[in-house]
Structures are given as structure tokens and as C-alpha cells.
Amino acid sequence: MQDTNDSETFAFGPHLRTLRRNASLTLKAVAERAGLAVSTISKIENDRMSPTYDVLLKLAKGLGVDLVTLMAGGERAVSDAPAGRLDVTRSSERNAYPTGVYVYEPFAMRLTNRLMDPTLVRVTARSRDEFPDLVRHPGEECVFVLTGAVELHLEFYAPIRLEAGDSVYFDGRMGHAYISVSEDDAQILNICAGVGEQGIGQLTNGMLTELND
């Protein structure tokens, strides 16, 4: 497995500014739609602050795009049809998105309207104090520890230590944060599902129906 340090670091701030300007949106307009402070978005655009996963979701909502469009750099092949679609992510193609506490490397960035957001994450945080707030987002989250060990801090539970080979599945709306408790940064496979506002029936063009049908 490729070391996360070898991945190309993506200049997210300028990309975010370009998306916003292309959409003819002011900082204030995006902030109001995203539920974020104008100063927060300005700091992110100027690379003075790195967004966490929940902030990325809010930015996507504020810009009216999906997470792939928000995080993808350059041109990508767009496919909205679920039947038979496929995307291979080569190790050399992954971009690294540092957030101060994690380094994200998302997969399948050429597909839109995905049902999952799979990401390789290097956990750099060593203390719960490094998180201003616990992370919260829609949907559910599943994590598998690849290397090292992490301590998962949850809103309603005592901290849980997870070693390499361990996994956890929980409601993403519950506040959570991972810290590395191994000598080196820990690496985890993080899969979030159901983070979008569309129903599963819409996302699959009716191939799967809503649970309440």
C-alpha cells in the first residue's frame, strides 16, 4: 500500500474559490446556504484553514454540487447511470487533502451520485483537544483500521481503542473523532453512506426503492 505521504497534495482553497466564482456566488451566499461563517469559507479559500469532512459536506451543499465535484481537481469522466458503472483508482492518482487532524485520500472521484464515499485516511491527530468540535455528518460510517491503532471518541460512548484489523460502524450524526494512539500515524479505510440529500431511489434511478415504500 502506498504511503499517504507520497500522494499529491491537492490545493483545495483555490479550487473552492474557482467553483464558487464559476457559480456566480458570493462568500456570503455560500455561507448562508452552507450554514457556515463567511470568515470560515474565506480562510479555507486562502488555505488558512483545512475543512473537516462535515465542513466539506456543508460546502458542497452551499455550492449545490456533490462531494466528488467539490473535491475533484481537473477534468473527470461523469457517469450518472448506475448500471454497470465502474471506476478504478490507481495509487498514483489519489490526491491528499490535509485537514490538520486527518489526511483524506478519496476513491472513485470520477463517479457522481455515489451511494458511498470511500476514503483512505491517515490519522495525524494525537489528542481529542486538536478537534474544536466533534465531527458530525448525515448518514452512516464504517471504518476499518489498516495500520497502527486509533482511539475513537464518540458523543454517547466511552473512547474505543481500535487496533489494525478492527472495525466499527455507527451513525455519522453522532459526534465522533479519531486520534492515533500508535507510534506512527494510523491509517484507516473510512466509508460513509447516505450522506447526500437524495433518496436511494433517486440515486439508483429506481433500481433500489426507498425503505419506506
Image (spheres, helix red, strand yellow):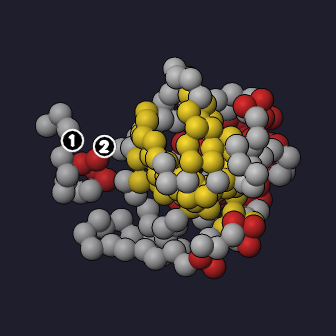
User: Which residue type does callout 2 highlight?
Assistant: Gly
Asked whether, in this view, residue 59 is left or right of residue 184, the answer is: left
Q: Is residue 134 left or right of residue 98?
A: left
Q: Depth check: give the residue in front, 68 or 149.
A: 149
The residue at the point 44 percent across, 62 percent down is: 112
Q: Position of residue 56 (x, y in %)?
A: 61, 45
**Which of 184/176 is in front?**
184
Q: Nearer the viewer, residue 72 or 88?
A: 88
Query: Is 118 placed above or below 174 here?
Result: below
The crowd level at tag 2 (other Cα within 10 Å; few <14, some 14-19, many 20+) is some
Report the residue at 27% width, 74% height from top. Answer: 84
What label sits on residue 210 in the rendered view?
1
Horizontal and vertical percent position of residue 35 = 62, 30
The dot on residue 199 is: 2
Residue 110 in the image, given as x and y percentages of width and height: 49, 70
User: Does the image show residue 134?
Assistant: yes
Q: Earlier in the sequence, mark 1 or mark 2?
A: 2
Task: Give me the residue at 76% from left, 51% from top.
Answer: 183
Amino acid type, mark 1: Glu
Is residue 16 in sight in this rendering?
no
Q: Tag 2's secondary structure?
A: loop
For this orientation, the residue located farthest to the left is 213
Secondary structure category for the residue under label 1: loop
Marks 1/2 in contact by CB < 8 Å: the verdict is: yes
142 sits to left or right of 151: left
Is 102 above or below relative to 175?
Answer: below
Q: Residues within 10 Å of mark 1 (few under 14, many from 20)?
A: few
Rendered position, 184 above or below 199: below
206 lies left or right of 122: left
Quadrant placement of the N terminus: bottom right
Disc sitting over residue 188 in the figure? none
Q: Residue 172 appears at what percent x and percent y?
A: 48, 35
